[in-house]
Amino acid sequence: MLVVGFAAGAFQANCYLVAAGAGRECVVVDPGEGAEGGVEKAVREHDLTPVAVLATHGHYDHVASAAAVADAYGVAVHIRPEDRHLLTDPLAGLGPRLASAVGRVTLPEPTAVEPLSEGPLDLAGLRVEVFHTPGHTPGSVVFGLRAEEGGRLALTGDTLFAGSVGRTDLPGGDPAALSASLRTTVLSFSDDTVVLPGHGGSTTIGRERAGNPFLT
């Protein structure tokens, strides 16, 4: 499995391209603010063909470039219905402080949008498991993948970080829902699952189970 990741925009949100290998089809996860150039570079360097844009949730720093990337490659944006409106109305998901930092902004409507539901999604020769994990936003999800070489990945968006979890004080945030999502979904993954979060460096479920104060 090939995973290319980079941080983009003022909020340094992680965007990932995931493929079975170089020269293959890929999915683009969370192309946020200013991510178009990084996606184009990764596609060119690894000879990839994007077939879908996947959103872990609808916050601006994770979907600001979703329409631009999806339309550039003629693919759909996949997002939970609860966060669908944030694709074009980003300020609806931000509190006053973040909204003032972002400024007045609207995003273009993607040509194609597909609703995410729980269960497997077969894209780019990959089996992507979609887990609904509300709390950070109502439509937050975690994407789980198993590599052919063995091992498992979890792209957690802003549900889980190394040493922390997503904030719940923005519109739609729900601390009780996030706690339930962590307990019933995230902690059900095996300890050797590699976590690729929406911000910051990678970690593992085992490391977070042992040391993350929000999980112990």
Image: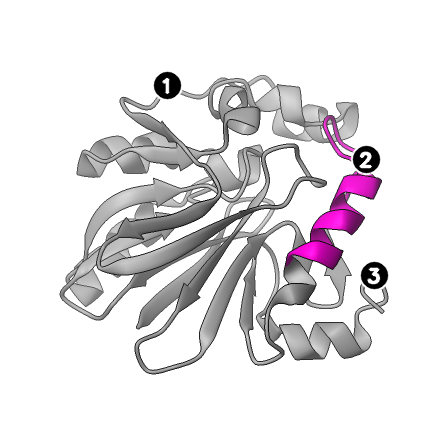
Q: Nearer the viewer, mark 3 or mark 1?
A: 3
Of mark 3 and mark 2, the one earlier in the sequence is 2
Q: Nearer the viewer, residue 151 or 65?
A: 151
Residue at 29% over, 60% down: 126
Residue at 23% over, 36% down: 75
**CB within 8 Å, label 1 to label 2:** no
Q: What label sits on residue 169 in the rendered view?
A: 2
How far from the left and from the top, in percent, is residue 193? 55, 74
User: Can you tell which quarter of the image residue 125 is in?
Assistant: bottom left
Disc 3 target residue: 214
Q: How is the image coloured?
A: one colour
Residue type, mark 1 in image: Glu
User: Can you tell which quarter of the image residue 68 is in?
Assistant: top left
The magenta span reads: 167-185
Membership of 178 in magenta stretch: yes
* Label 1 neighbour load within 10 Å: few <14, some 14-19, many 20+: some
